[in-house]
Amino acid sequence: ISPNVLKILVDKYHIAPISTPEKDLQEMLA
């Protein structure tokens, strides 16, 4: 994944490259 694509994913879907599934769920449900 290119840095630009990764940035878009982080900006749009709040996906962090380094994160636990539990934290990801908490972020999405927050």
Image (cartoon, rainbow, N blue to C red):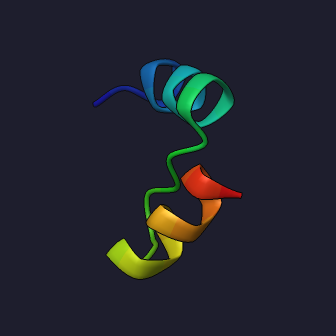
| x and y percentages locating residue 9 in the rendered image | 49, 28
Residue 7 location, x and y as percent? Answer: 59, 29
Residue 14 relative to residue 18: left or right: right
| Residue 20 location, quadrant | bottom left
Residue 5 versus residue 27 in the image, above or below: above
Q: Is 24 left or right of 12, judged from the image as shown?
A: left
The number of callouts visible is: 0
Q: Which of these two is toward me, 12 or 4?
A: 12
Is residue 27 shown above or below 13?
A: below
Quadrant that contains the C terminus: bottom right
Please report the residue visible at 46 percent of the width from the left and 32 percent of the height from the top.
Answer: 6
> Where 11 sits versus 15, above or below?
above
- x and y, in percent, of residue 29 in the image: 59, 55
Which residue is drawn at the image coordinates 54% and 32% (left, top)? Answer: 13
Residue at 63%, 60% in the rendered image: 27
- Tell me if 26 is positioned left or right of 21 in this view: right
